[in-house]
Image: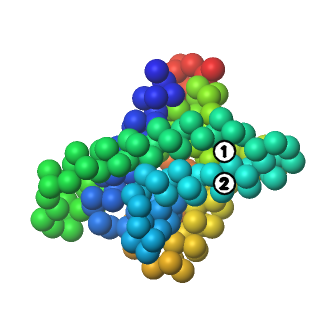
Amino acid sequence: MMYLGGLLTLSFGVVLMIKASMGIAPWDALNVALEKHIGMSIGFWVFAVGSVLIVINGLIKQGMPNLLGFIPVIIIGLLIDGLNALLTGRIDIDSQFSGWFLFVAGLLILSCGIALYIRSSLPAVPNDEFMIELSKRTGWSLAITKTCGEGLAFCIAFLLNGPVGVGTLVVLCLLGVLIDVASRIFDMIKIPKY
């Protein structure tokens, strides 16, 4: 339940940030850019980009790719497409204030969702597995390794003219820190790790 709740929560955060139109998380900006240039849905690109990352993560671990990583990308891809369709036409951004409010809410929800689902020790989303494996290999904090992964996605999304904006830079700088903070809060309130 924690795993599925975390995946649902992070997917909801992603969709809120897309609807805010203030710039979105770098990995999501990459998925939206691919959708605009090539077609298919954002959820499809969550799966396709995740598949490439599964292979890269196997190389970092110097072992077999984690094929269970396909589970969360399929779930998140379906959730993002479903939530995006559900909220289309239901959220009206009529000012910069409401856009930024929605963006900040989405960012906080996304951070909590990631911190929650990784506590379950079930298969990680490939870009989060990248953060975790890089942290294990280097000894760096999750904040630093998440920022490295987000920076890579930001560069690719920028080159593809994805929907990057001020919000994308905010995510690039803060998402790793917010995940770390949320994880510490979950420790303090004794949400178990499995």
Using the rendered image of the protein, determine whether residue 126 is visible from the camera's viewpoint.
yes
Q: What SS does tag 1 mark?
A: helix
Callout 2 touching callout 1 (CB < 8 Å): yes
As drawn, 5 above or below 102: above
**Front label number (2 vs 1):** 2
Front-most of residues 84 and 164: 84
Residue 167 location (% of width, % of height): 39, 66
Q: Name the side, left or right, on which 27 lies relative to 108.
A: right
For disc 1, the neighbor class at 10 Å (few under 14, some 14 to 19, many from 20) is: many
Front-most of residues 129 and 59: 59
Type of amino acid under label 1: Glu
Q: Mark 2 points at which residue?
A: 53
Q: Residue at x 85, y 43 (%)?
A: 63
For disc 2, the neighbor class at 10 Å (few under 14, some 14 to 19, many from 20) is: many
Type of amino acid under label 2: Leu
Cα–Cα gap, marks 2 and 1: 9 Å
Residue 92 location (% of width, % of height): 14, 58
Residue 174 location (% of width, % of height): 50, 57
Q: Residue at x 20, y 63 (%)?
A: 97
Lower position in the chain sequence, tag 2 or tag 1: 2
